[in-house]
Amino acid sequence: MILINKMTIKAAVISLGSKSSKWTVKALKKYIRIVDDINLKDIEATLSSQKLEILYKGKPLEEYDCIYAKGSFRYATLLRAVSLIASQSSYVPIKPAAFTIAHDKLLTQLRLQQQGIPMPVTYLTATPEAAKKILETIHYPIIMKFPQGTQGKGVMFADTFAAANSMLDALTALKQPFLIQEYVETGGSDIRAIVVGDKVVAAMRRKAEIGEKRANIHAGGKGEPVILDPKAKKIAVRAADAIGADICAVDILESAKGPVVIEANISPGLQGITAATKIDIADKIARYLYKKTKQIAESKKKMAATEIMKEIAAPEVGKEILTHLDIRGERILLPDYVTKETKFSEKDEVVIKIKKDKLIVERFDIGKKVK
């Protein structure tokens, strides 16, 4: 449903221009008057001892009420800097630290572990020798993968020690860190849940092709709609919250012990899950961004108005006040806040000084006058 009475707020989507991002921009325009589609490649973050600044095509970025920044792991550092700077004056649905955490599988696992969110047992070693000792004692099959990577890339399956040992030699030659993780048997399927705010707005089960262990759509997996049980929904929302994302895809395996989280994606593709579930996820995201931004904008206005009213209602002594006179017959009545501030009472003796266009009233005490 299109909202006719749009609030005067401004939003920007900073991305690499994917189809999912274009959908989100289009959906946002149903709720927010001004929505700018900004290419992340045209963005710079300037940091100095005096100020932090976001530049767009070499010029300072305009002020926005909401900035939704997203992109691949290759831009994680820039995205973190942009969100950190933007969060000082705008609502950002992805917290700055989330770009570092979500784009690193090890950091994701550490954060999930800290929050008590169920996940597969994972190992990280400092040397090939230490890794080999783990491979000698671990139960097979296992998964070996790089900390960074998306769409299932960099994920390898080993069903024996010999296979894992061969992979270890190749990974050691690449001189890259890698994770060893227990394999959870699910028949080649997993679940992707899209979390928006504190709700799962859509979920699908992804089924890998025959002979393929990765269920990712980009790896040839097929998606079908699924309704998560309350426990799985709660785990998905907790996982998104743990990494600091209001908008996030959470990948879950249905293990014998219950659902376990294997990954969180803060820049998920929407095409596959939209086609599978027939849910307009871009609209769900846009509606949430609108409501959240409106809520924050109204809260800021209320706070500003409260501060103004405090100054008016309780002015400092000696402060000039612009108001209208309340004249009853031949009497001038002072505003209540003036009486409260001066603490005048009917028992006080006062000195009244009258000049043209000026009236001064002072309390008269024995031997002295107090204003």
Image (tube, rainbow, N blue to C red):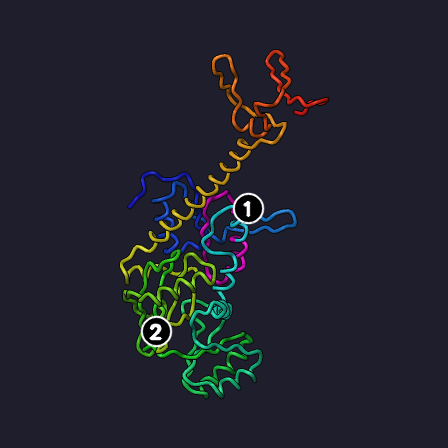
Image quadrant containing the C terminus? top right
Determine whether 322 is above or below 112 in the image: above
Q: Going by the image, does 188 lie left or right of 139?
A: left
- The crowd level at tag 1 (other Cα within 10 Å; few <14, some 14-19, many 20+) is few
Q: How many marks?
A: 2
Rendering coords of residue 144 (x, y %): 46, 78
Q: Nearer the viewer, residue 291 or 56?
A: 291
Taking the magenta stretch, the answer to whether it contains residue 91 is: no
* Closer to the camera in the image, 147 or 251: 251
Q: Is residue 10 above or below residue 116?
A: above
329 or 51: which is nearer to us?
Answer: 329
Comes first in the chain, label 2 or label 1: 1
Residue 83 lies, in percent from the top left, at 51, 53
Q: Which structural element holds mark 2?
A: strand
Amino acid type for the residue under numbered disc 2: Glu
- Answer with left or right where residue 355 lies relative to residue 306: right
The range drawn in magenta is: 54-83
Residue at (33, 58) in percent of width and height: 201
The residue indicated by pointer 2 is: 254
Q: Secondary structure at mark 1?
A: loop
* Residue 202 shown left or right of residue 306 in the figure: left
Q: Residue 26: percent from the left, percent from the top?
A: 35, 48
Q: Residue at x 47, y 76 (%)?
A: 122
Query: Which numbered circle lies on residue 77?
Result: none
Q: Mark 1 = which residue?
A: 58
Q: CA distance from mark 2 to mark 1?
A: 48 Å
> Is residue 294 left or right of 209 when viewed as pictured?
right
